[in-house]
Image (spheres, rainbow, N blue to C red):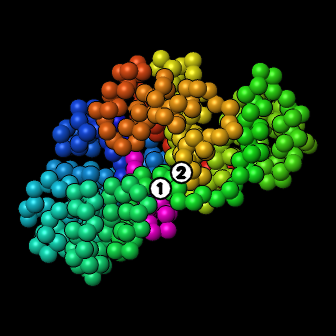
Amino acid sequence: MFIARQPIFNKSMKIYGYELLFRSDSNAKEFRNTSSSSATATVLGGLLEQGINQVVGKTKAFVNFDYDFIMSDTIELINSDTLVIEVLETVKIDYNLIERLKYLRRKGYKIALDDFEESFSSYPIVPIADIIKYDIMLTPLDAITDDVNKALSQNKIILAEKIETDEQFQKAVEMGFHLFQGYFFSRPKIVGSSNARKSSKVQYSRIINELKKEEPSYNTITSIIESDVNLAYSVMRVMSNKKSEDSFNSIKKALIRMGFKELERWINVLMLQDISQAKPVELMKLSLVRSKFSEHVASNSKFKEHIEEVSMMCLFSVLDAILDKPMSEALEGMLLSENVFNALVHREGDFKPICKLIFAYERGDWAEVQKFADIIEIDTALLSKGYLESIQWAAEVLLTFE
């Protein structure tokens, strides 16, 4: 079973929910090319077992349903406050379906029309729908102005899907769209970057570079941290949140207790958290999920000797978007291995297959996932568990910074 998720934002770039993407196997990229009922039953069972709140938190879960599943009572196993029922564009519409959707809506479930291409005025489910989703690859924004205005006049929530650039996002906002789905939030906006974060990044880079030495010095790292009150506070806060009966009366003792390996992980995380303050929280969350998921992938593949490298590579995979700089500039001054640098900057080298697998997993491109899983020699049956555990771990890490 494969389970992934794609974030859905509101106009303020706050998370509204996640569309859950899943397949019972890797036969195809599209939901309708495999047994949708079987896949849906599998994922709902997995989500209920895992705890759906671990996957979507306090937000909404958008899930595609076919005719048979809409007509079943299994949907009602998930709380109506959490679940958004996405009606596939291929679903056969008849009297029974319409009555069932009306019933579910009365029970508090939101109804969404997926990949909407029909006539807004005549499509029979429109009056029941709360959310209309437009795939802007199938229906470009310029082509749906009239329908968008009609939807707004009827107080529908409209969602623009496949938003890949900030320009598309801004245009959709101007048109009146409420929700936005796509990876536009993880693309750098290189218009004229600022150096406002430079000093902070320099401090972190000095620590990371010291940690890369054959014999790192606690004294050197301590002096760097103690020169920045915000950084010192962050390190002590991390240590205070760890389950330990020890107390620390100095930065150095806290660092020694942490150890170089754990310190490097947290310095990387703290750096991203610090420099991404003006960015969507989801960007930080994405880097954490990728980092932990890549550890799982590496440890179960032919890259088991490179777990730490792979983890750092994926943690830094959104650094260009955070700093609004080309990746080569974002990584400037950091002592990274050739494999990590080539994968992040040139999208090539030994670690390329891991990047490709993880990015394909996020998109729900299961054929590509299978392709790169074969290359790196990992059993795809292990991926879903690792991905869900990574989501949970990322959520726990982010709680540290609240």
Element class at badge 2? helix
* Main secondary structure type of the part rendered in magenta: strand
Q: Alpha-carbon distance for marks 2 and 1?
A: 8 Å
Residue closer to the observer: 313 or 261: 313
Q: Residue extending furthest bottom?
A: 153
Q: Residue at x 74, y 33 (%)?
A: 209
Q: Residue at x 60, y 44 (%)?
A: 329
Q: Residue at x 35, y 75 (%)?
A: 176
Q: Position of residue 244 (x, y in %)?
A: 78, 38
The residue that label 1 is drawn on is 185
Q: Position of residue 200 (x, y in %)?
A: 74, 51
Q: Is residue 226 left or right of residue 370?
A: right
Dot 2 amino acid type: Ala
Residue closer to the observer: 306 or 16: 306
Sequence-wise, the earlier of marks 2 and 1 is: 1
Q: Position of residue 185 (x, y in %)?
A: 47, 55
Q: Position of residue 359 (x, y in %)?
A: 42, 39
Query: Which mark is nearer the camera, 2 or 1?
Result: 2
Q: Is residue 199 left or right of residue 175?
A: right
Dot 1 amino acid type: Phe
Q: Is residue 151 left or right of residue 287?
A: left
Local crowd size for mark 1, using a 10 Å CA cut-off: few (<14), some (14–19), many (≥20): many
Q: Residue at x 61, y 45 (%)?
A: 330
Is 95 drawn above or below residue 45 in the view shown?
below
Say whether marks 2 and 1 touch (CB < 8 Å). yes
The residue that label 2 is drawn on is 321
Is 56 drawn above or below residue 289 in the view shown?
below
Residue closer to the observer: 380 or 48: 380
Q: Residue extending furthest left?
A: 94
Instruction: Let me know if residue 364 appears in the view.
Output: yes
Magenta segment range?
A: 5-16
Residue closer to the observer: 165 or 314: 165
